Image (tube, helix red, strand yellow):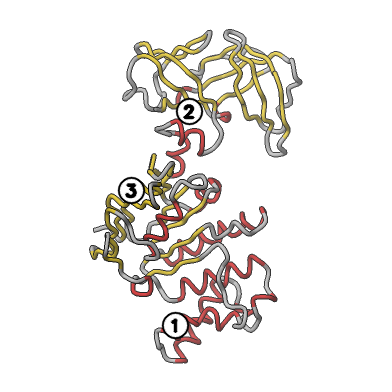
């Protein structure tokens, strides 16, 4: 039995359907992110799971018990869930320790037990030395750690996080997403994480549900979403890619001015003959100054550098494929410097490409 189960979950506001028939199951201890652009329905879905919003259709089950359906919503305080908001929502008039222990006191635990559990969880989130401080005396990252400790200390069945890192600067966001994953690995709480940041989702999740216009387009492990996207939207939203119109003829994929063999290309077994869309990740194409050997099975084509941007950790090249004037974005290491206008040879690896709907 799944710990958390969404069945046909639907929510409309007036004539606008925000969540449209979502089905999703979370196993005990699993970390799933709802990833998508603003307005795709991910936060509305999270708030229905939390019990703040009543669905128009479908249901939510926790450990086999129905907790939400049209006309019947179990109140949030009875759901055995903890939620972390974008604004942290920690009380400014309470110390760190008082904030973390508040939920335990509401459950009427003995004072000694509250003190012990608060001390233990603050040590886990590396905030024990700041137990007596107030939120105004903390940095954004420290406040986020307090919110995490307060949510985890009550030992919820499900942990819900609504874009919890959006108020932090870039370096702190990177630090905190690894911290969130570390805490999950330690406590194994079933977790639903809402974000529009693909890097956050990739770093924290066991699986990612990519949402678009109220529906889930694909649910998969992070590396599978990246290397085996099933739709145009997923391919374009999760990482950067080149989406190329092509023709599938037998086991050959024809593009503008050249063709490549389909063996090893993801999705080719399910694709129909005729017009197809090919996703080619910038990292899957290698650039060479001279024609390389083809013993590794790559298709090699001549081309030229049409433009470039230096990103520090990589070069982002625009490369024109000579045979068809097709332009591709190609990522290369910082040490691989090619001048604009210089000739290059492109090595394509079919096993790092995918046909998408």
Between residues 108 and 31, which one lies in front from this camera angle?
108
Residue 4: percent from left, percent from top: 31, 59
Q: Nearer the viewer, mark 2 or mark 3?
A: 3
* Callout 2 secondary element: helix
* Callout 1 secondary element: helix
How far apart are the two marked residues, 2 and 1, measured between alpha carbons?
50 Å
- Tell whether label 3 touches label 1 (CB within 8 Å): no
Snapshot quadrant of residue 63:
bottom left
Would you name the residue on which mark 3 appears? 22
- Compared to residue 144, the image places residue 216 above or below, namely above
Quarter the N terminus occupies: bottom left
Would you name the residue on which mark 2 appears? 352
| 90 to the left or right of 10 | right
Q: Residue furthest front?
A: 14
Between residues 202 and 86, which one lies in front from this camera angle?
86
Would you name the residue on which mark 1 appears? 104
Residue 20: percent from left, percent from top: 35, 46
Q: Name the residue: 43% across, 76% down.
A: 154
Q: Name the residue: 47% across, 47% down.
A: 35
| 9 to the left or right of 346 | left
């Amino acid at each position: 039995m799944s710990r958390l189960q969404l069945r046909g979950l639907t929510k409309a506001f007036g004539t606008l359907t925000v969540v449209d028939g979502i089905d999703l199951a979370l196993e005990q201890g699993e970390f799933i992110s709802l990833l998508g652009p603003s307005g795709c329905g991910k936060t509305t879905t999270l708030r229905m799971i939390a019990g703040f919003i009543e669905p128009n259709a479908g249901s939510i089950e926790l450990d086999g018990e129905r907790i939400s359906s049209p006309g019947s919503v179990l109140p949030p305080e009875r759901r055995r869930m903890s939620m972390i908001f974008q604004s942290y929502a920690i009380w400014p008039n309470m110390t760190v320790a008082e904030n973390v222990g508040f939920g335990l006191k509401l459950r009427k635990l003995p004072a000694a037990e509250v003190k012990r559990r608060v001390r233990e969880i603050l040590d886990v989130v590396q905030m024990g030395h700041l137990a007596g401080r107030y939120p105004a005396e903390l940095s954004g990252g420290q406040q986020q750690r307090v919110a995490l400790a307060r949510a985890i200390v009550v030992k919820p069945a499900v942990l819900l996080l609504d874009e919890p890192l959006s108020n932090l600067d870039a370096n702190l966001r990177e630090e905190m997403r690894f911290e969130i994953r570390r805490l999950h690995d330690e406590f194994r709480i079933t977790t639903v994480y809402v974000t529009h940041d693909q890097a956050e989702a990739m770093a924290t999740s066991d699986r990612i549900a990519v949402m678009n216009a109220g529906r889930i387009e694909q649910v998969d492990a992070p590396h599978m979403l990246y290397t085996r996207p099933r739709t145009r939207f997923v391919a374009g939203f999760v990482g950067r890619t080149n989406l190329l119109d092509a023709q599938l003829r037998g086991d050959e994929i024809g593009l503008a001015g050249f063709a490549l063999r389909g063996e090893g290309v993801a999705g080719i077994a399910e694709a129909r003959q005729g017009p197809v869309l090919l996703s080619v990740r910038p990292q899957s194409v290698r650039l060479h100054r001279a024609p390389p050997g083809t013993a590794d099975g790559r298709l090699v084509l001549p081309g030229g550098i049409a433009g470039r941007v230096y990103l520090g950790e990589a070069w982002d090249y625009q490369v024109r494929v000579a045979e068809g004037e097709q332009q591709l974005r190609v990522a290369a290491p910082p040490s691989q410097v090619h001048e604009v206008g210089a000739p290059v040879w492109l090595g394509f690896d079919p096993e790092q490409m995918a046909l998408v709907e």
